[in-house]
Image (cartoon, rainbow, N blue to C red):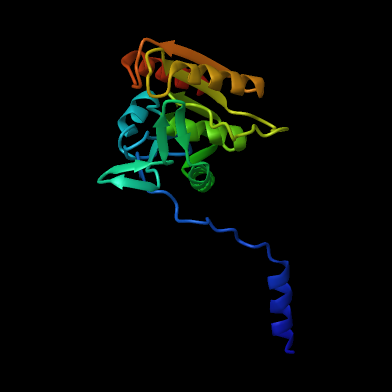
Amino acid sequence: MRRWALLLLVFLACRKPVVAPTQPLLESVRSEARAGKSPALVVLHGLGSNERDLFQLGQFVAPDAVVIGLRAPIVRGPNSFSWVPVQFTPQGPVHDAAEAERSRVRIVEFVRALRQDPGIDGERITLLGFSQGAILSEAIALTEPELISGAVLISGRTLPELKPVVGAKRRPHVLVLHGTRDTVLPYENGVTTKDVLSSAGYEVEFRSFDAAHEITEPMVEAMRAWLAGSAR
């Protein structure tokens, strides 16, 4: 064997493999970055919506951040997407755990790629989600606690199959918002989410509102104030 071929084989054997995303990165919309590294706010929409649904809200509550709206991978109809199939039964929502995990992995891959963006401060990435978006945001906070710095969970619930990672060097700060009149994902889900996170050692602020399954003006003001405080 020629010497150059032998050297090539040695090089290939010693080189660390490049791990590519298992699937193409999620579709997204993004605000303009400022000079230097900026914090990022990644917004995750609810069932049947799309990446633009919470985009302007994200820009309002985090004016100094690059805002990225993600589109869920499951197509429901024109401009209508979901993170996980779900059936609402008298006993509560029943979701497809395998699809939830696939969506969780897709979001994790997106955030990992975002952390390598030269215009993004990888240590200051916050997730903000409503309903299904909150469910997946919490899933990442629980399973990849060192990946993000914060999470805003609006009207979501905790997936029962998830277990918090043990021994994390850091955990994101979390804001949980829930309406007391929510009939889609009742208020008790917000209380449970707060308890699960607090028991796992997360710093959690829990706020209840006179609201249904919606985002109200007082919720928006609470988010804006919390995000401004967490940025300091």
Q: Position of residue 212 (x, y in %)?
A: 34, 17
User: Would residue 26 be found to the left or right of residue 60 on screen?
Assistant: right
Q: Position of residue 191 (x, y in %)?
A: 52, 16
Q: Is residue 128 at all visible to an observer of this figure?
A: no
> Which quarter of the picture shows residue 17?
bottom right
Instruction: Identify the residue at image location x=57%, y=31%.
Output: 160
Foreground pick, 42 / 75 = 75
Foreground pick, 181 / 223 = 181
> Which quarter of the picture shows residue 63?
top left
Q: Residue furthest top?
A: 210
Q: Position of residue 12 (x, y in %)?
A: 68, 72
Instruction: Identify the residue at image location x=44%, y=41%.
Output: 84
Q: Is residue 157 above or below residue 40?
A: above
Q: Position of residue 146 (x, y in %)?
A: 62, 35
Q: Is residue 1 at all visible to an observer of this figure?
A: yes
Instruction: Identify the residue at image location x=35%, y=14%.
Output: 211
User: Would residue 174 be found to the left or right of residue 55 on screen?
Assistant: right
